Amino acid sequence: MNSDSLYQFSAFTVILLMLAFYGGTYLMTLGIRKKNEDADAFMVSNHRVGFGIGAASMTATWIWAASFYAAATSGYTYGVSGPIHYGLWGALMILFIYPFGRRFRKLAPNAHTLGELIHARHGSSSQLILALSNVLGSVISLMVNFTAAGALVSVLSPLSFQSGVVMAGLGVLLYTLWSGFRASVLTDFAQLVALMAIAVVIIPAVFFAMGGPSELVAGLDNLTAEQANFFSTDAILNQGAPFFVAVLAYAIGNQTISQRLFAVDESHIKPTFLTATVGYGAIVIGLGMIGLMALTLGVEPLNGEMNNLIPQMVSSYLSPVYIALFFILVIGSLSSTADSDLSALSAIMMADVYGKNIAKGKADPKRMLLVGRVTMIVATAVGIVFASFSLDILVMLVFVGALWGAIVFPVIASCYWNRVTNKAFTVSVLVSMAMFCLARFELVPLTGAGGLLFELLASVGGGVIIGLMTFGFLGRTVGFAAGIIAMLAMFVFATGFLRDYTVLLASLTAYGTSTLVCVVMSLISRETPFNFDTIRERVGNYDGESAANGATPSQSATASTASRS
Amino acid sequence: MTILFGFYVLIWPALTLGVLVLICRAVLLDRRQARKENRELV
């Protein structure tokens, strides 16, 4: 992967940069380190993380290395609107989850994972489905981030891909292992400051070095009509729409987000998520503009590899100092996401697996901490191995995407509608996964009546997405109306057409199927409607005074609620 | 067109700078508040 056309650092310089970055980050964490960390703080700090740290951490976590590369690729491929169709929808993932997040927090103020809430609502099977989707997502994310580190090191230095992967993996583990989530959020702030400051400098620097606005406008002649059109249907259908469909799924299926949701001071949830939305959008769309600049200049990606676009532009137009800054930018973004993934995985294993399913309410905080740290070590090793061998994870990615789409409605409905049952949750997800596979891998012909059936299910899915998004902000009546209008519009316009876009069809089918099955099974169930007040009593802290006195998590939660009032 | 495209590209780093200032200011306030309440920042 080494290339003579890009600026090359010496091996010594790269090692020095890595040592400075990870060494500095590690030193930061020494300031908050405690000899005896407590299990709750290891997972969600003190549930009172402030607006500044919370917003910084949300933004840094959501920006991973692939964000820059994919935004630039989108700008290069789809032209003027390309960076928007990547960055805007990614940003909206943060925005659209916050109304639901407030509900989750209200139901279970002392939770550490969304799985704990679902466990209190339904029981183990639903919780473990959610935990499984979270684990798979975080492992994939770890692998992708370590891969990005390997690729960057191998492109900009004589060092091998594997050495980049190992340095990033060990570096992240080093500063996250002891203090867990607390180290993650604190270092996220520093990493985000560096990341933003560098982005603020690099984007205008490349822009003016390539000739500024006049050169960009002159280069528009190199674009096709679709690329020059801000409202390009090509960009909307191929980039924007699949991302839009995933907006809620990513946010629900990602423990890194729910972990921050449960950590931020309850009164700061809204400003935290709004700031993170703007911050993420601005950085990612801004760096995506470098792809648009490359397109207008007629630059060809080195070795045909789109991920080389940004380093290539920085290398061509700026001095080595800027390339070093770019190096730190990428390492910072991938590390902030990787440390969040490690914290998320450890919280899932500590709370969802050990706390709820092995210790069953009698969790030992010290053992929990051990479980969390061992999880981090194992996850890092798995991430390094997967990344080093460049394993093909496409099938895994497809399944995780489907699982996330399938759980969106059951998870959200379980938190608002007292008739949703554990059986409805579990069966709806499984049936939805099966229907997704039939459509995604075209196991049945998507023509005639079969094609129509999937398009109808996908139309329901489209209505569910629009309905849930509207419901989050504007309430039940408007949400229902928006969902039904969107579903009817899709019945009219998508039938006979959507079958040609298999990925989109399958994703929407997952949403539609799980919703239909979940609603029908819940309606015909004769179970007593659920009392939401019991969740608060069932989900509590594992550490602290009440736990030390022998109280179970539920007793601890009750005690903490009582002490607040 | 030149001004429009210049704005289109440069608005994003400008927004990033705005968010950066907002977050740094908020962290300083968080820190002050945490000290006042005699608790840790995270």
Image (cartoon, coloured by chain):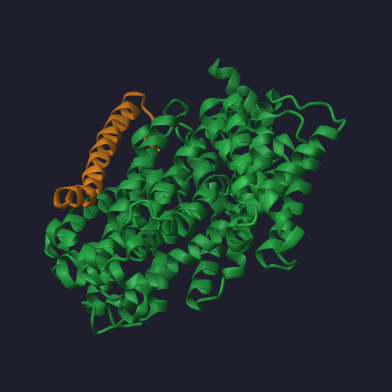
Chain colours: A green, B orange
Q: Which residue is drawn at 42% across and 29% down?
A: A268
Left or right: residue A261 versus residue A333 is right
Q: A32 and A220: which one is in front?
A: A220
Residue at position x 44%, y 54% in the image: A236
Q: Where is residue A124 in the image (x, y as percent from the top left)?
A: 75, 45
Residue A176 spot, x, y in % from top left: 44, 54
Whether residue A123 can be seen here: no
Residue A149 in sight here: yes
A401, above or below A16, in the image: above
x, y percentage for residue A436? 69, 58
The image shows residue A173 at horizontal and vertical percentages of 44, 60
Q: Count of labels shown?
A: 0
Residue at 15%, 56% in the rendered image = A213
Q: The C terminus of chain A lies in which quarter of the figure?
A: top right
**Residue at the location (73% across, 28% down)?**
A418
Q: In which quarter of the image is the N terminus of chain A?
A: bottom left
Residue placed furthest toward the top? A565
Please tell me which residue lies in front, A259 or A86.
A86
Q: Classify residue B7 as left or right of residue A559.
A: left
- Residue A376, above or below A417: below
In the image, residue A464 above or below residue A152: above
Relative placement, left or right, of A224 versus A406 is: left
Question: Is A268 on the left-hand or right-hand side of A75?
Answer: right
